[in-house]
Image: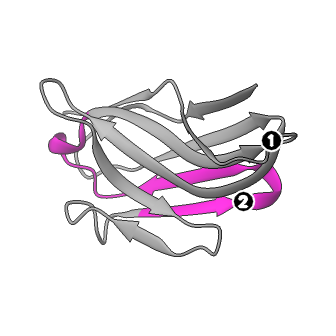
Amino acid sequence: QVQLVESGGGLVQPGGSLRLSCAASGSIFSIYAMGWYRQAPGKQRELVAYITSGRRTNYADSVKGRFTISRDNAKNTVYLQMNSLKPEDTAVYYCNADLSTQGTMIPNNYWGQGTQVTVSS
């Protein structure tokens, strides 16, 4: 069984920073792409950023220059450093990973439970 566990969310003032972490655990064989999505109230879930196993990154236009995604393969962990936060960044942030498990070694997609980020004065 695979679990993705996010941490680091919270309340921050506009212009502030937060760092989200997502650790994957379980019978993991290999992790391919890892990413972050977010969903604000009344809106669809959207991609924020992703990073491949080769550390190629992609960002939503709305966060370019402010957010940085990184990963530690030894810890099966992906991070999202969020700077210059704006009220419109308020959302539940979800970790996502494409990975294969021991035994089957067939890639599947997994989601974390989400962590709330609120940007407000």
Between marks 2 and 1 in the image, the one whose residue lies nearer the viewer: 1
Please tell me how many numbered marks the rendered image carries: 2
User: Residue, x 77% and y 35% (percent of image)?
Assistant: 25
User: Residue, x 72% and y 59% (percent of image)?
Assistant: 72
Residue 23 shown left or right of residue 96 in the figure: right
Q: Quadrant of the N terminus?
A: top right
Amino acid at the residue labelled 2: Asp
- How many residues crowd around disc 2 within 10 Å: few (fewer than 14), some, or many (20 or more)? few
From the viewer's perspective, is residue 7 above or below residue 18?
above
In the image, residue 121 lies in the stretch drawn in magenta: no
Between the residue at mark 2 and the residue at mark 1, the CA separation in whole angstroms equals 24 Å
User: Residue, x 82% and y 57% (percent of image)?
Assistant: 74
Residue 75's tag is: none
Q: Tell me the residue that label 2 is attached to.
A: 72
Q: Earlier in the sequence, mark 2 or mark 1?
A: 2
Does dot 2 land on a helix, a strand or a loop? strand
Does residue 104 show up? yes
Residue toward you, 15 or 81: 81
- Magenta range: 68-90
Residue 38 shown left or right of residue 29 in the figure: left
Q: Tell me the residue that label 1 is attached to.
A: 104
Residue 63 in the image: x percent, y percent? 27, 61
In the image, residue 79 lies in the stretch drawn in magenta: yes
Going by the picture, which residue comes out furthest to the right?
103
Q: Quadrant of the C terminus?
A: top left
Residue 75 in the image: x percent, y percent? 79, 51
Does residue 118 show up? no
Q: Quadrant of residue 24?
A: top right
Residue 10 in the image: x percent, y percent? 41, 29
Residue 62 in the image: x percent, y percent? 20, 60
